[in-house]
Image (cartoon, grey):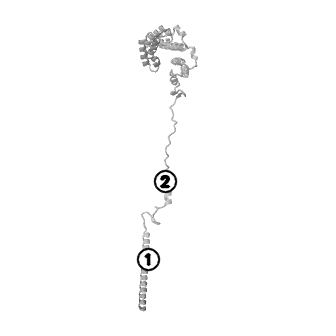
Amino acid sequence: MAAGLLVDEDPERAYTHAAYARRKASRVPGVREASGVAAYTVGKWQEALSDLRAARRMSGRDNFLAIMADCERGLGRPERALEITGDPAAEQLDAAERIELRIVAAGARRDMGDTKAALAELQVPELKERRARPWIARLFYAYADVLEELGRVEDAREYFSRASAVDTDGVTDADERLAVLEGVELVDVDLEDGIVWTDAEEQDFSEPEDEPEAAPAAPARDVRAREDEVGPDEGDGPGVEDGFDDGTGDEDGDRAGDTAVRSDDGDRADDGDDADEVRDDAVKRDADGGERG
């Protein structure tokens, strides 16, 4: 039914479904059992106890004795809880249900302030069990919890470690309890790689991102060396320094100008002589022609 499917995922919703079914079929043993378990998961101790007692009377089954005893504890009646855990019918229960009864009995003893008696309730042959089962994990955990209360820290550490090793379903917080006793921090729990503990802060081993390297600056003496090789500013005439003129350049220019003028005058003179020769030849030809005529 819906209540049984939701009891672990959504206890409140499971209780709502179970309560509705109880109103519709209160004389069905299975309905009363489901209603009692749903009420127990949400802490309605008295309602759960009533439903489970009714279911036991109707069905004759004793497999909810541990829950009934725990309801008595929830109601503040550890003595009645011990009465249920001592019921002779408990001898017929399977190992898991018997272990649950022992755990509840130990809790009732602790409620009454008798921690040593609580430890005695848990000293059963199943403490030597090594197979991974949920009820074994709960037994080891309860035993370690009582040992720690008694001040037997080393023994408590051993049984918390055993509980952690067989608790494949995660029904206890044995890992955290063991980490506290070991003085380490529980960093991560990985289902494949196991448990990772550390007693120091995690270090960052990631490689830094590559940054572009800046071009190295040229040394000052290299700059001066290159300036010495180049010398004064390129483009200046020889012998001319920045901002200084000795006047020799102008004198050379004047001489060149005079030479060009003289050359130009000579060319004009030569042209005049050639013109005179041409005129003289023409006069001679005219005179010769007149004489022939």
Residue denoted by label 2: 220
Q: Secondary structure at mark 2?
A: helix
Is residue 271 visible in the rendered image? The answer is yes
- SS for dot 1: helix
Looking at the picture, tell me which residue is in the foreground, 181 or 98: 98
**Which residue occupies 43% across, 71% down?**
253
Q: Quadrant of residue 13?
A: top left
Q: Is residue 254 above or below residue 279?
A: above
Compared across the picture, whether 247 is left or right of 178 comes to left
Classify 10 Å Cα crowding around label 2: few (below 14), some (14-19), many (20 and above): few
* Closer to the camera in the image, 234 or 42: 42
**Alpha-carbon span between mark 1 and mark 2:** 56 Å
Task: Quarter of the image for the C terminus: give it.
Answer: bottom left
Q: Residue at x 43, y 87 (%)?
A: 285
Q: Point out residue 35 in the picture as x, y percentages from the top left corner.
A: 44, 14
For badge 2, the amino acid type reads Ala
Res. 236 mark: none
Say which mark, if any, is on residue 263.
1
- Front in this rendered view, residue 200 or 79: 79
Please name the amino acid that badge 1 sits on: Ser
Q: Position of residue 79 (x, y in %)?
A: 47, 9
Residue 43 location in percent, x, y? Answer: 43, 16
Image x and y of residue 71, in percent? 46, 13
